[in-house]
């Protein structure tokens, strides 16, 4: 075991602060990674504050991890020392159930081992995430990060990137499609970049007028303010696909009204409380309301390779660990442009 510095929350009501976690000695199939950067996902806030229920403490959040390989086990084939590697939301799964054998490890029937706020597959050893300086993960769950990408900008691809890439692929986003992206935060800005790169005509649907110029720079062709009720009338029946990233409860019905017949809204934002959906919002127009959870390991690698080829990274504000609590407060106010990323070197000696 190696003791490594980390940042943790002791309870759902305490701020995060310096902490120490133990990482296992790398086994024959393990990759030992020196973490360079870890993104801050809104899911970190939901879980640290136990908004979804069942949170385990102390909690070291962080599932947007990029680093350099420090050591590899004897049987590791995909990685060598010095490679740029990534770890996303999962560190293991049963590897043999139906979803696992169809590259959908996130839906492992035994329950995937999530990167933090969970356990390894022994169901005993707690997992601790990327707000830390090192991590040890089986090579099957470690991703190759294209060397051409800036490592801080690449970190958010491991969650925000795959979470938006996967539904765009599932719904066959293509040139000329009219795609609405709801909420311009970490996920939203990746959705805009990725959908635009696939040739879609992207409209940013945001509550923040001040983000309009940025939305256009990110690739949006149009911007509409959702705090203005007339937006929902003006854009009624417009979109083939809406990617909804809002982190707080809101009225899905209003957004469904902006879909054309047969159009789909994919919910990726995970508000802690349910909201009612009227049957009529779906029936009139044969509309589809769907969800999507991250992506499997193979699709995550496909997304990273795609981002390497198209030179796509996240827009980041790099912060030292000491600013994590402040970053959470800013995210809750929608004041994020567009992903906070922790410089994990700042944890050394924290
Ligand atoms: P984020 O960076 O905080 O962005 C969320 C954005 O939603 C905000 O910037 C804001 O955009 C908008 N928003 C927030 N509160 C709102 C409200 N009350 N009404 C309308 N719009 C509001 O969060 P994120 O990291 O992108 O994560 C977004 C959500 O996705 C979270 O719930 C997270 O847990 C979830 N998530 C899901 C998956 C998955 O696999 N499905 C993966 C990762 C994250 P504007 O200022 O533009 O309005
Ligand atoms: Zn996430
Ligand atoms: Zn499985």
Image: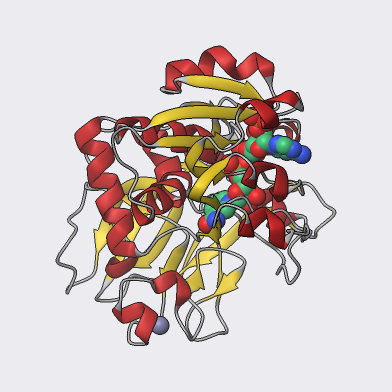
Q: Who's the residue at 30% across and 58% down the image? A: 299
Residue 223, how many percent across, how many down? Answer: 56, 20
Q: Is residue 5 among the parts visible in the rendering?
A: no
Residue 302, how many percent across, how many down? Answer: 25, 52
Q: Is residue 202 among the parts visible in the rendering?
A: yes
Q: Residue furthest right?
A: 13
Q: Who's the residue at 63% across and 57% down the image? A: 282
Q: Quadrant of residue 55?
A: bottom right
Count all numbered tags in the image, as a single digit: 0
Query: Left or right: 309 with respect to 199?
Result: left
Q: Who's the residue at 27% across and 62% down the image? A: 298
Front one among 150 and 29: 150
Q: Quadrant of residue 156?
A: top left
Q: Residue furthest left?
A: 77
Q: Who's the residue at 28% across and 38% down the image? A: 307
Q: Quadrant of ligand 1?
A: top right
Front one among 114 and 176: 176
Query: Looking at the rendering, in which quadrant would you find the C terminus?
Result: top right
Vertical arrangement, residue 346 with respect to residue 296, above or below: above
Residue 7, how many percent across, how many down? Answer: 63, 49
Vertical arrangement, residue 96 with respect to residue 146, above or below: below
Query: Left or right: 328 with respect to 65?
Result: right
Query: Left or right: 137 with respect to 256?
Result: left
Residue 266, how many percent across, how many down? Answer: 53, 52
The color scheme shown is: secondary structure
């Amino acid at each position: 075991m190696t003791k490594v510095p980390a940042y943790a929350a002791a309870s759902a009501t305490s701020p995060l602060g310096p902490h120490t976690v133990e990482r296992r000695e790398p086994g024959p199939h393990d990759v030992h990674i020196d973490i360079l950067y870890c993104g801050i996902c809104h899911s970190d806030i939901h879980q640290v504050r136990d908004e979804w229920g069942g949170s385990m403490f102390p909690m070291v959040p962080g599932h947007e991890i990029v680093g350099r390989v420090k050591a590899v086990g004897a049987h590791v084939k995909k990685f060598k020392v010095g490679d740029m590697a990534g770890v996303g939301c999962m560190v293991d799964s049963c590897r043999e159930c139906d979803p696992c054998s169809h590259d959908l490890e996130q839906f492992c029937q035994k329950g995937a081992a999530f990167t933090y706020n969970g356990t390894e597959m022994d169901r005993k050893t707690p997992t601790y995430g990327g707000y830390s300086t090192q991590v040890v993960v089986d090579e099957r769950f470690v991703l190759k990060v294209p060397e051409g990408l800036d490592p801080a900008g690449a970190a958010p691809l491991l969650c925000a990137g795959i979470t938006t890439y996967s539904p765009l692929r599932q719904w066959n986003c293509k040139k000329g499609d009219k795609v609405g992206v709801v909420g311009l935060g970490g996920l939203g800005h990746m959705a805009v970049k990725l959908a635009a790169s696939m040739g879609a005509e992207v409209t940013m649907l945001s509550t923040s007028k001040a983000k309009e110029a940025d939305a256009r720079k990110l690739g949006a062709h149009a911007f509409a303010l959702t705090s203005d009720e007339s937006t929902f009338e003006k854009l009624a029946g417009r979109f083939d696909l809406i990617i909804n990233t809002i982190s707080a409860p809101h009225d899905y019905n209003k957004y469904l009204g902006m879909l054309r017949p047969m159009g789909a809204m994919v919910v990726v934002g995970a508000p802690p409380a349910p909201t009612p959906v009227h049957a009529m919002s779906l029936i009139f127009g044969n509309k589809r309301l769907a969800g999507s959870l991250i992506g499997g390991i193979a699709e995550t690698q496909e997304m990273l390779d795609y981002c390497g080829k198209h030179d796509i990274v996240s827009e980041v504000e790099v912060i030292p660990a000491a600013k994590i609590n402040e970053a959470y407060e800013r995210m809750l106010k929608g004041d994020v442009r567009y992903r906070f990323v922790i410089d994990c070197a700042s944890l050394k000696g924290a």
